[in-house]
Amino acid sequence: MMGITAAAAMTTHWQLLTMHGWGSDHRAWNGFRRGCELRGWPLRCIERGYGRFPATQPKWDGPNRRALLLNSLGMHLVPPQILATAEAVVLLASFGRFVPAGGAGRPLSQALRRMDERLAGGELQQLFTDFRARVAQPQPVELLPPGVEDGPLQAQGISDLRQDLELLASCSGLPQAFPPSAAVLLVEAGQDQIVHPLSRKALRLALPHATVLSLDGIGHGLMVPSLPAQVLQWIEELR
């Protein structure tokens, strides 16, 4: 009994906050819930509120250690006070600068402008059909969790989506609040059709001490059933 008690006392407990990316919602994190429940770790999801789910902004709660899971644009959407106080940060298919400088970035800039025009013009169904196909490639789009296309979009949601397209176009590096002493895990999609290879390279250079998990043959949606277990194990092994 004493051995079990001692082992339990040595177990590190974490609390996890998550932030989804553009056009997504908190359902992107459903694959992590069971692993967190088994470990007794609370998992709370920040919700941007694009579509059917209202915006929510949970905060760190209690003495447990603090880990952030940030998908794609999520690093630039998470509140600075939450980002600054994280002890571990997992960046999934993410970037500091989304549009590379110079000629390499021109096609992306044009694509963002076209997406904004389609949002403004009400071309929502086809826009999200096209976007989700690129997020999934080279995997079947049916494997993606649902996002904002799954429910009604109100004027405020469309406005927020357009605002965040501007953020995609303008973000130029790590957020100022990024915690310099945090442990960092970069999860890269080897066949990412959303994040430019130069943006992935720049993120590695900006975080030279990060652990890198590169998933060959996988698209931006990171549809790998074993990924939540790998991420949670990485957090669990931090000291």
Image (cartoon, rainbow, N blue to C red):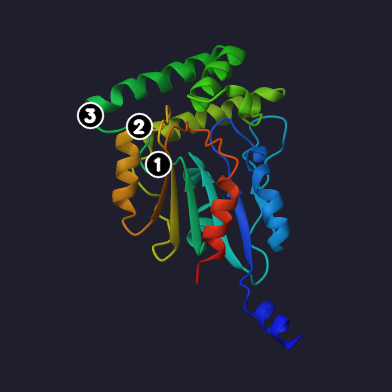
Mark 3 or 2, closer to the camera: 2
Q: How crowded is mark 1: few (under 14 residues within 10 Å), some or many (20 or more)?
A: many
Residue 61 visible to an observer of this rendering = yes
Q: Mark 2 points at which residue?
A: 196
Separation of residues labelled 1 and 2 (CA atoms): 9 Å
Amino acid type of the residue tagged 3 in the rendering: Gly
Query: Where does the image place residue 107, in percent across and percent down from the top left?
Result: 32, 20
Residue at 52% x, 14% y is 118
Q: Is residue 158 left or right of residue 110?
A: right
Decide which of tag 3 and tag 2 comes sooner along the chain.
3
Amino acid type of the residue tagged 1 in the rendering: Phe
Compared to residue 2, the image places residue 209 above or below, namely above
Q: What element carries label 1?
A: loop
Compared to residue 178, the image places residue 2 above or below, namely below
Residue at 68% x, 69% y is 62
Query: Where does the image place residue 111, in percent across and percent down from the top left?
Result: 40, 19
Q: Is mark 2 on a helix, strand or loop?
A: loop
Residue at 66% x, 44% y is 31
Query: Where does the image place residue 121, in percent across and percent down from the top left?
Result: 55, 11
Separation of residues labelled 3 and 1 (CA atoms): 17 Å
